[in-house]
């Protein structure tokens, strides 16, 4: 059971300037492929890489903080 935001809430977050993160909640290497589900939800919610915090380089991330 995944706890991704529904795509409509992702879209509202993007419109409101909320920064998002994507993750797998992986507890073993085989679960890393679950990232595709988070990416899919983000795309359906019109999120782009600029809206996703963990697409940034370390330097960009630290600057954002």
Image (cartoon, rainbow, N blue to C red):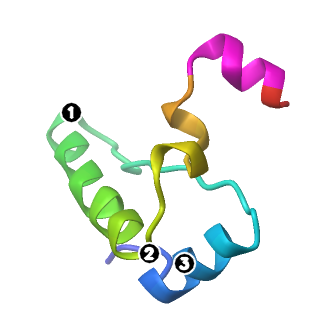
Neighbor class of circle 1 (other Cα within 10 Å; few <14, some 14-19, many 20+) is: few
Residue drawn at the location 63% of the way across and 14% of the way down: 58
How many neighbours does mark 3 have within 10 angstroms: few (below 14), some (14-19), or many (20 or more)? many
Of the 4 image quadrants, the one containing the N terminus is bottom left
- What is the CA distance from the residue labelled 2 to the residue labelled 3? 4 Å
Q: Is residue 29 shown above or below 41?
A: above
- In the depicted view, which residue is nearer to us: 23 or 59? 59
| Earlier-in-chain disc, 2 versus 3 | 3
Residue highlighted by disc 2? 45
Name the residue beneath numbered marker 1: 29
Which percent across, then down, holds residue 60? 68, 20
Q: Residue at x 70, y 25 (%)?
A: 61
Left or right of residue 22: residue 59 = right
Contact between labelled residues 3 and 2, with CB atoms less than 8 Å apart = yes
**Which one is earlier in the sequence, the residue at label 3 or at label 1?**
3
**Coordinates of residue 29 in the picture (x, y in percent):** 21, 33
Q: Nearer the viewer, residue 4 or 27?
A: 4
Callout 1: helix, strand or loop? helix
**Horizontal side of residue 52 vs 46, given as left or right:** right
> Alpha-carbon distance for marks 1 and 2?
27 Å
**Element at label 3:** helix
Mark 2 falls on what kind of element? loop
Report if the CB atoms under discs 3 and 1 are less than 8 Å apart: no
From the image, tell me which residue sits under label 3.
11
Nearer the viewer's eye, disc 3 or disc 1? 3
Quarter of the image holding residue 19?
bottom right
Would you say 50 lies left or right of 40 here? Answer: right
Residue 32 image position (x, y, % from top left): 24, 41
Residue depicted at x 17% and y 45%: 33
Q: Quadrant of the C terminus?
A: top right
Image point (47%, 44%), residue name: 49
Please report the bounds of the magenta region as a residue range.
57-63
């Amino acid at each position: 059971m995944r706890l991704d935001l529904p795509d409509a809430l992702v879209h509202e977050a993007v419109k409101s300037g909320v920064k998002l993160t994507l993750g797998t909640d992986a507890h073993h290497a085989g679960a890393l492929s679950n990232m595709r589900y988070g990416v899919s939800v983000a795309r359906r919610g019109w999120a782009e890489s600029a809206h996703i915090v963990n697409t940034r380089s370390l330097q960009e991330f630290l600057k954002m903080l």
